[in-house]
Amino acid sequence: MLFLSKKRDWLGNLRGDLLAGLVVALALIPEAIAFSIIAGVDPKVGLYASFCIAVITAFVGGRPGMISAATGAMALLMVTLVKEHGLQYLLAATLLTGVLQIGAGYLKLGSLMSFVSRSVVTGFVNALAILIFMAQLPELTNVTWHVYAMTVAGLGIIYLFPYLPVLGKWLPSPLISIVSLTAVAVIFELDIRTVGDMGALPDTLPVFMWPQVPLNLDTLLIVVPYALPMAVVGLLESLMTATIIDELTDTASDKNRECKGQGLANIGAGLLGGMAGCAMIGQSVINIKSGGRGRLSTFTAGTLLLIMVVFLDQWISKIPMAALVAVMIMVSIGTFNWRSILNLKQYPVSTNIVMLATVSVVVWTHNLALGVFVGVLLASLFFANKISHFMYVDSSIDEAGATRTYRVVGQVFFNSADKFTAAFDFREALEKVVIDLHRAHFWDISSVTALDKVVIKFRREGAEVEVVGLNQASSTIVDRFGMHDKPEEIEKVLGGH
């Protein structure tokens, strides 16, 4: 079974994976260069990192078909470190980032993705789509009409080529668009910006290099404040991207294995002179839409990237940026969840607020982790508020008017504890109070404290209190933290000390 699974991951979609990998490799080059410039390092640092991360995750990652490389989100976190301490400390931080991510994998932190609601994922996707589009705007401002014509033509090829019989289904349209526009630009010698204008491409293969930094506590204190957020952002973007690709391909992935795979990839990148990276939603969508599904597509993308920039740099440098802009605009259009706009009228207000808040924070700050944190926090608060409304208490009194039974239904926790306490009438003259908890569940210290408060107040008024119906889980927390059934604690509270 394992052999068949491995064979399917690598050879189950041979043509699609090879062609999709070629498209992704071409699209990775300018982005890797751009992200290197953002981080303040030589373009080869981003290119080597993209090669290394893609190849390693192809073997050890948890999501076949997903593309990992140097990314803008990670590059933004490196700027200050590079500026103040230089490249060698960046390499050290990259290694530490990898170690932290491997640790997260063994701690099974990938399972925390289950706490990310659907509305947060939708907001994350929409925000990334907007950021991908915004990143193309510098290539479309203050340029000649040739650039606009090339971009429109590129989009036309991308969307219309698939309708051609036979060829349209065999060849990925983004690849045809890049090749066609490059041929036009070269033949007509158009004066437009090319990949070569982004920066010098490396002319040598990467070599092993251990960071030239002192191995002491001072170095650790320098790199930890950068490695920790890089590890968090890298895992967050990778796991969110894996979730999106899961849905696009209708397959499952191993999130904890992905954490370990990203960590190993970043360690490999740091040892070959590259910067830290993570999964790329844009390139992953390109890969899927170009027909890539297996690990071979990721491996092909990384391998061809290195081959092209080192051995075919004269040809690669001639690719017009307009061709790649067209591909990325296609990615942004395909990534954005257009149905989410229509769903604004149908979905609850709380769900819409979570989605819009996630989009707004990510787009405004360009910080994916902060946006997702805000979204998860809001979703949790809305959920807690909603659940608290389903808790209620009703009561009945016996014929003699001496015993009242309170029946509690629902979830008692920090947000419903005050509502629980307020449901009891402590001024009523009663001989006995029965609190029936058969249909209730106590979740936390706040709920236990509320129960203690109710029981003690009734006893202060002279009533006998009987608590019945606690389920096993509620009994465990009440027995451990409650004090209404502990005479010595009650004596202190009632003033008998």
Image (cartoon, rainbow, N blue to C red):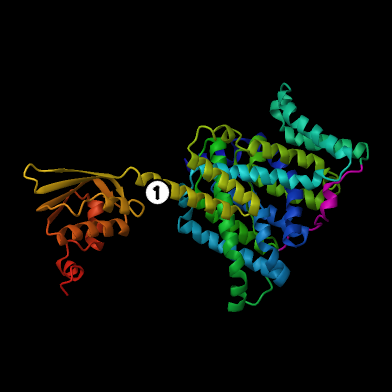
The residue labelled by disc 1 is 384
Q: Is residue 134 left or right of residue 280?
A: right
Front residue of 90/354: it is 354
Q: Which residue is found at the position 69% from the left and 49% from the top?
A: 302
Q: Which residue is found at the position 57% from the left and 60% from the top?
A: 231
Q: Position of residue 259 (x, y in %)?
A: 53, 54
In the rendered image, residue 196 lying in the magenta stretch gets the answer: yes
The C terminus lies in quadrant? bottom left
Front residue of 442/449: it is 449
Quadrant hosting residue 207: bottom right
Vertical comparison of 92 with 475: above or below: below
Front residue of 172/93: it is 93
Q: Which residues are magenta?
A: 191-207
Front residue of 275/425: it is 425
Q: Is residue 2 visible?
A: yes
Q: Position of residue 235 (x, y in %)?
A: 56, 54
Q: Position of residue 91 (x, y in %)?
A: 67, 66
In the rendered image, residue 326 lying in the magenta stretch gets the answer: no
Q: Is residue 205 visible?
A: no
Q: Which residue is found at the position 60% from the left and 51% from the top?
A: 361
Vertical comparison of 66 with 156: above or below: below
What secondary structure is found at the residue carrying circle 1?
A: helix
Q: Position of residue 280 (x, y in %)?
A: 64, 48
Q: Residue furthest left?
A: 400
